[in-house]
Amino acid sequence: MTRLFNDNMQFYGYRRPDGRVGVRNHVLILPTITCATQTAQRVTELVSGTVTFIHQHGCAQVGDDYDQTFRTYAGMGKNPNVYGVIVLGLGCETHQANSVAADIAMTNKPVEVVSIQENGGTLQTIAEVAKIATKMVQDASMVPKELCDFNELIVGTECGGSDACSGLSANPAVGKTSDLLVEQGGTAILAETTELIGAEHLLAQRAADDKVAKKAYEIIDAMENRSIQMGVDIRTGNPSPGNIEGGLSSLEEKSLGASTKSGTSRLEEIVDYAKIPKKKGLVWMDTPGHDIEQLTGMVAGGAQIVLFTSGRGTPTGSPIAPVIKISTNTPMFERMSENMDLDAGQIVTGEETVDEVGERIIKEIQHVANGKLTKSEILKQHDFGIWRIGPTF
Amino acid sequence: MGDYKTLYLNEKDNVAVALSEIPAKTSVTVRIKDKEIFVQILDTIHFGHKFAVRPIPKNDDIVKYGEVIGAAVKDIEAGAHVHVHNLEGKRGRGDKIVQ
């Protein structure tokens, strides 16, 4: 693929009716309730070009927890990597398919609703959804790609299965990529609030204004207080056993390494979980450190591509957004090459600088935006997990 | 004495990182800018793990990246492995709150 690598970085993407640009062209079968996930999955086995996700939510949820789950479902549908959505409900759940569909329809993309109870059961529903999906996939295939600037991109960043190299190689390299993306007018999302505990003062210093700086301390306090209210040592969950084996001794040590993913840009905004950023530039989304929950939050928040660094290795992928996985060390990259896309281990061995790897990553973003498949897409790794903030009733 | 790769990130740091496994009872030299610190390694230090570059008394901060990553729970000798057995994080410690 010959592409432009000039000062103004561009890619070929799919312009959606709301003006946003996708790098993929999926038809999403969106089950709003756990009871509909199996049916949705059957349809994806029948109709190519469709994707779905398995989850255990959508009923007996109330208040802020209801809202956050709702926002996550709708955000997945609104993501510009999705051409159109078939929202699938059982019929009696709290997260009604009609409400989620109405919210997604504000983007003016094709949205249809199907209910298992109204269709008289599993088999008729599979047939109905497959029929609608067949037409939607063909319509999607006729959307032409157009040349777009990098300022259309929202790129999520995360680290998972961290080791002591994470903060030395892949994370600072992603920080360089984040800075390059911001220079191009794009948006980089920093997430995993838990793994920024101990580094908040460094981020607050880079805040665009006092309000953002104050919010940085507030969300860190809220996350830390959750462990304090539970009377537990946060280290029982984070750093994880794999982190500790890799040489990380405390949450603060992990955080200082994790925060380097944000580069040196000004922190423009802090957004709630699964909310679409209003500002461009560097944005911090308040998510837990859980790999799949933060990935889901960023994709629901509009990220078309996610950068994921790992020291221990991981198969993680999203049904909707390509995830570019970057190893912090070469031995792991070689051991898990079927899962990892890029190697930043050359920084550890001194063969490449952080800036060189950062530039390599932004070029990979361009290739992937143009259609190059990531390992997790090829292996159909369709992870999805919602950050639940309340009990199920 | 082999030439073991280490990484010493900031002059304020009292620990450095092994970039290859360092056997016990070897000596290494950690470098930052024009400064060199000679360290006699006491324990085997695995890839990615930390060792003290100078003695760290009990309760003193342990510093990496020029920032505090925790405190020493016992006196740590120069050259000793620094990890969860002698370092405790200070954050997110709900277990330390007395009702």
Image (spheres, rainbow, N blue to C red):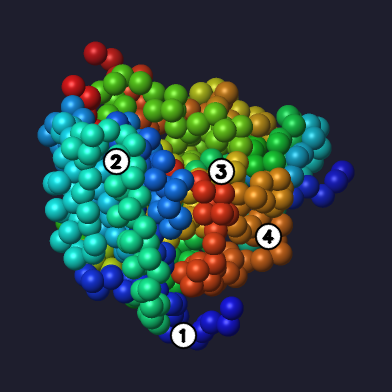
User: Is label 2 in a helix, a strand or a loop?
Assistant: helix
Q: Earlier in the sequence, mark 1 or mark 2?
A: 1
Checking the image for residue A125, the label placed there is 2
Q: Toward the viewer: A243 or A276?
A: A276
Q: Earlier in the sequence, mark 4 or mark 2?
A: 2
Q: Chain of mark 1?
A: A
Residue A324 appears anywhere in the view: yes
| Residue contact at pointers 4 and 2, CB within 8 angstroms | no
Badge 3: residue crowd in 10 Å (few <14, some 14–19, many ≥20):
some
User: Is label 3 in a helix, a strand or a loop?
Assistant: loop
**What residue is disc 4 on?**
A346
Image coordinates for residue A228, horizontal then vertical, percent? 29, 25
Residue A201 appears anywhere in the view: no
Q: Amino acid at mark 3?
A: Thr
User: What is the spatial separation of the Cα atoms under label 1 and label 2, in whole angstroms?
Assistant: 50 Å
User: Can marks 2 and 3 be said to lie on one chain?
Assistant: yes
Q: Toward the viewer: A158 or A36?
A: A36
Identified at 32% across, 23% down, the residue is B94
**What residue is disc 3 on?**
A314
Q: Earlier in the sequence, mark 1 or mark 4?
A: 1
Q: Is residue A102 left or right of residue A320?
A: left
Image coordinates for residue B31, horizontal then vertical, percent? 68, 54
User: What is the spatial separation of the Cα atoms under label 2 and label 3, in whole angstroms?
Assistant: 35 Å
User: What is the spatial separation of the Cα atoms under label 1 and label 4, in whole angstroms?
Assistant: 26 Å
Badge 2: residue crowd in 10 Å (few <14, some 14–19, many ≥20):
many
**What residue is disc 1 on?**
A7
Q: Is residue A207 above or below residue B65?
A: below
Q: Nearer the viewer, mark 4 or mark 2?
A: 2
Q: Amino acid at mark 1?
A: Asp
